[in-house]
Image (cartoon, grey):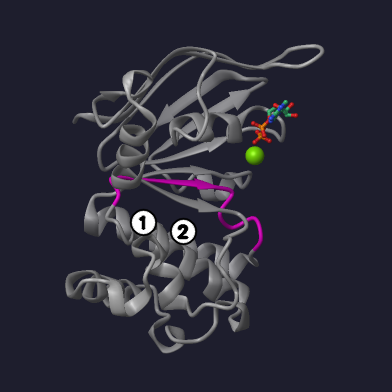
Amino acid sequence: MANVVELRHVDKVYRGAPDVQVLFDITLAFAERSFNSIVGESGSGKSTLMNIIGTLDVPTSGDVEIAGQSVASLSRDRLAELRNRTIGFVFQFHYLLPEFTALENVLMPYSIGPQGAKREVLQWADELFDFMGVSRVKNNPAGKMSGGQQQRVAIIRSLINKPRVILADEPTGNLDSVNSAATYERFRDINQRYGTTFIIVTHDRRIAEQTDRIVEIRDGRLLMDIRK
Ligand SMILES: Nc1ncnc2c1ncn2[C@@H]1O[C@H](COP(=O)(O)OP(=O)(O)O)[C@@H](O)[C@H]1O
Ligand SMILES: [Mg+2]
C-alpha cells in the first residue's frame, strides 16, 4: 500500500544557547489506511515529530513527504493547502471556541457558520455527529458541554475535510478511562469505515497495544517499530 507519510533522515535541532538536538535520523513511513501509535517517555520528542509530520514545523535536515509531495519544495500557500486537504489534528486540549456551538466549531474551516457551508458539508457534519453520538448537543455552546463531548466534537472537526491522515497527540490525556476507551473505539471505527490513516501519540501502553503498529521513540531516536 502507498505511504501517506514518509520521513527520511529527519533531524531536528532547536536553536538556542546551547542548541538542543531533539530528533536524530528518523526514517519512518506510514501506509494509507494504517492505524498506528507512537509511544515514548515525556520529552522523548513525540510532539516534535508530530509537528514535523503535520508540516507545522520543519526538520533541520532530512525530507518529509506527505501524500507523495515533498513539502520542502512547496510555497507557504501550497503547503497550507496540502495540510488542510490531507491532515486532521486532534490535540489533548481541543481548542474549541466555547462561545460557539458544537456545529459552528466543526464548520469553522468553512469560517462562515451553518449558513455559509454547502449542503454536502452540512450532511457530512450531521453524519459525523450521529456517528460520534453527539447529535443531541450539536447546537449547544461548546463551553457548556462535558469534556468527553468536547473531545468528540474536536474529532468531528478534524474529520470534516475528510483528511487522509489524523494526527492525534495524546488525545485522551484529559479524559477519564471510559471516555478514553470510547474515543479509541471511534478512531478505529473511522479508520475502518473511511480508510483514514491514524497516528496516535499515547503514553498508555494498553491503548498502544490495540493499534496495528507501535513506534517507540527514545531520546529522539527510533527505538522500536513493532507491527502486528
Ligand atoms: N520549541 C522548543 N524549543 C526548545 N526545546 C524544545 C522545544 N520544544 C520542545 N523542546 C524540547 O525538545 C524535547 C522533546 O520535546 P517534545 O517533542 O515535546 O517531547 P514529548 O512530546 O515526547 O514529550 C524536550 O526536551 C523539550 O524540552
Ligand atoms: Mg508531547
Q: Is residue 182 visible?
A: no
In the rendered image, residue 212, in percent from the top left (x then y), is placed at 38, 40
Q: Residue at x 70, y 16 (%)?
A: 15
Q: Residue at x 58, y 61 (%)?
A: 95
Q: Is residue 50 magenta?
A: no
Q: Is mark 1 in CB contact (under 8 Å) with mark 2?
A: yes
**Quadrant (top left, top right, bottom left, bottom right) of the N terminus:** top left
**Residue reaching furthest right?**
17
Q: Name the side, left or right, on which 144 lies relative to 113.
A: right
Which quadrant of the figure shows ligand 1? top right
Q: Badge 2 is on which residue?
A: 184
Q: Secondary structure at mark 2?
A: helix
Q: Is residue 163 above or below residue 221?
A: below
Question: Residue 188 has which mark?
Answer: 1
Under mark 1, the amino acid is Arg
Q: Is residue 212 visible?
A: yes
Task: Please name whichever residue, 46 or 111, is drawn nearer the observer in this view of the structure.
Answer: 111
Region of the chain picked out in magenta, as a range: 163-174
Q: How many marks?
A: 2
In the rendered image, residue 144, in percent from the top left (x then y), is placed at 61, 83
Q: Residue at x 48, y 64 (%)?
A: 154
Q: Is residue 214 above or below residue 193?
A: above
Q: Secondary structure at mark 1?
A: helix
